[in-house]
Image: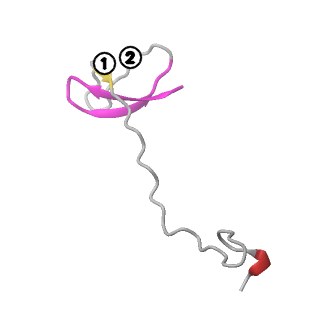
Amino acid sequence: MPLFGYHCTACGEDYEMLVFGSEPPTCPKCGSHASERALSRPAPPPQLGDPAPMCQACGQFGTCPGHAA
């Protein structure tokens, strides 16, 4: 049951819907079956914070159990 994005050509609504087999999608706003599949947009890269500190003794990132301060 893939999730697809659609654009309704009748009212202009953009929506996502689970599609079962060859059922035509129904626009949730106007109820029309005049929809076309929309291109998927790639997800943006995750926003990462500052990297974990590096242990000065061994070079391991994050908490270093052998050289904990």
Q: Real-space Cα distance between discs 1 and 2?
A: 6 Å
Identify the residue shown where x is 46% and y is 13%. 22
Q: Neighbour class for label 2 at 10 Å: few (<14), some, many (≥20)?
A: few
Given the current orientation, which residue lies at the most extreme right position? 66
| Viewer-closest of 58 and 32 | 58
Callout 1: SS: loop
Given the current orientation, which residue lies at the most extreme bottom position? 69
Q: Is residue 55 rendered to the left or right of residue 14?
A: right
Numbered mark located on residue 24 in the image? 2
Identify the residue shown where x is 63% and y is 73%. 54
Q: Does the magenta stretch include residue 7?
A: yes
Q: In this view, does 47 lie above or below 11?
A: below
Q: In this view, does 20 lie above or below 47?
A: above
Picture quarter containing residue 65? Answer: bottom right
Q: Which amino acid does label 1 sit on?
A: His
Q: How far across and down, in percent of the image, does residue 14 sit?
A: 29, 34
Mark found first going from the N terminus, 1 or 2:
2
Q: What residue is pinned by disc 1?
A: 33
Callout 2: SS: loop
Q: What residue type is labelled 2?
A: Pro
Q: Neighbour class for label 1 at 10 Å: few (<14), some, many (≥20)?
A: some
Q: Give the residues in magenta.
A: 1-20
Q: In which quarter of the image is the C terminus?
A: bottom right
Q: Does the magenta stretch include residue 61?
A: no
Q: Is residue 6 rendered to the left or right of residue 61?
A: left
Picture quarter containing residue 6? Answer: top left
Given the current orientation, which residue lies at the most extreme left position? 11
